[in-house]
Image (cartoon, grey):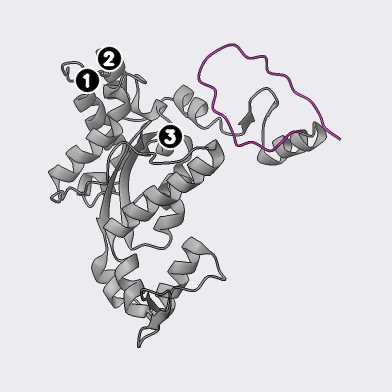
């Protein structure tokens, strides 16, 4: 998502990636794409595919010969980067190709084809965003939305800067205010505590804790969720420290892991 949003004219407001499907609440910026210069379009294309890549200057005919466009493919590129459907298509196909290669598998990855649903501005966006962030709650995977790593609320809790770069706040006054994220969290918890048949819910006790804190994260939650520089069984600390430990132990570099449960022994060590 981060790679494709650097190029496509799309604003992402909320997301949740489940085991066999994902949800994204986004706004397409077709007017911005229509006003973009050829230079900007090329720059965005190369943000996705690499600085040396060039977009096709035309279309291919039946025998593989390219028929060049009069403008070297600029308008074709404009339509491509300004299409939210094309964004979803390339996101699904790109991830599927990578996952199949990494896992040694073939075929489709996601359960169903992409479905686009138009959402009205205002309350409809707010409700839709909450529905997306509550997916892991309804599936019974976690008790708090931000405890699910692969969602917009989880990203906000673990990596606020990264979340601010990827996500665009909803165009609602309450969400744009300084305490907008806390107010949104209150709303999500209130909706998530409503009982639904055959679905998980946020326990009322946890909902009351969030109300007392006016939607803010507790210090303990902040420390838990921001505990990012951790490699399982190796080290905890700065990124530089972990990379140094991995080099000394001749271990393959792995990304940070988040402590969720179990017992751990923490020790300090000075490395020369």
Mark 1 or mark 3: whose residue is earlier in sequence: 3
Residue 122: where, in percent of width, then height? 14, 48
Q: Which mark is residue 193?
A: 1
Gap in Å between the C-alphas at discs 1 and 3?
Answer: 20 Å
In this picture, residue 249 sits left or right of residue 231: right
Residue drawn at x 70%, y 26% as measured from the top left:
234
Asked if residue 114 is positioned above or below residue 105 in the image, the reply reads: below
In this picture, residue 44 sits left or right of residue 265: left
Q: Quadrant of residue 208?
A: top left
- Please, what secondary structure does the residue beneath circle 2 have? loop
Residue 94: where, in percent of width, then height? 44, 51
For the question of whether residue 214 can be seen, the reply is: no
Residue 128: where, in percent of width, then height? 20, 40
The magenta stretch is: 251-272
Gap in Å between the C-alphas at discs 2 and 1?
Answer: 6 Å
Q: Quadrant of residue 67?
A: bottom left
Residue position for label 3: 157
Residue position for label 2: 203
Asked if residue 8 is positioned above or below residue 173 in the image, the reply reads: below
């Amino acid at each position: 998502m981060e790679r494709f949003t650097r190029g496509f004219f799309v604003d992402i407001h909320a997301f949740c990636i489940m085991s066999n499907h994902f949800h994204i609440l986004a706004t397409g910026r077709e007017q911005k794409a229509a006003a973009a210069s050829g230079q900007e379009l090329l720059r965005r294309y190369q943000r996705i595919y690499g600085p040396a890549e060039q977009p096709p200057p035309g279309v291919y005919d039946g025998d593989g010969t390219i028929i060049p466009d009069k403008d070297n493919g600029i308008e074709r590129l404009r339509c491509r980067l300004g299409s939210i459907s094309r964004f979803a298509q390339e996101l699904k196909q790109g991830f599927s190709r990578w996952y199949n290669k990494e896992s040694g598998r073939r075929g489709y990855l996601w359960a169903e084809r992409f479905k686009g649903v138009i959402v009205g501005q205002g309350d409809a966006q707010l409700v839709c965003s909450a529905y997306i962030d509550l997916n892991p709650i309804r599936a019974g995977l976690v008790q708090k939305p931000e405890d699910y790593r692969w969602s917009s609320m989880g990203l906000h809790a673990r990596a606020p800067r990264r979340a601010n770069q990827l996500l665009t706040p909803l165009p609602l006054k309450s969400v744009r205010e300084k305490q907008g994220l806390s107010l949104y969290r209150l709303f999500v918890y209130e909706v998530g505590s409503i009982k639904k048949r055959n679905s998980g819910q946020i326990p009322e006790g946890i909902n009351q804790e969030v109300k007392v804190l006016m939607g803010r994260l507790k210090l303990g939650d902040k420390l838990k969720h921001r505990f990012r520089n951790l490699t399982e069984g190796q080290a905890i600390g700065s990124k530089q420290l972990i990379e140094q430990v991995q080099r000394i132990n001749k271990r393959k570099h792995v990304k940070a892991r988040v402590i969720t449960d179990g017992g751990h022994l923490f020790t300090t060590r000075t490395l020369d």
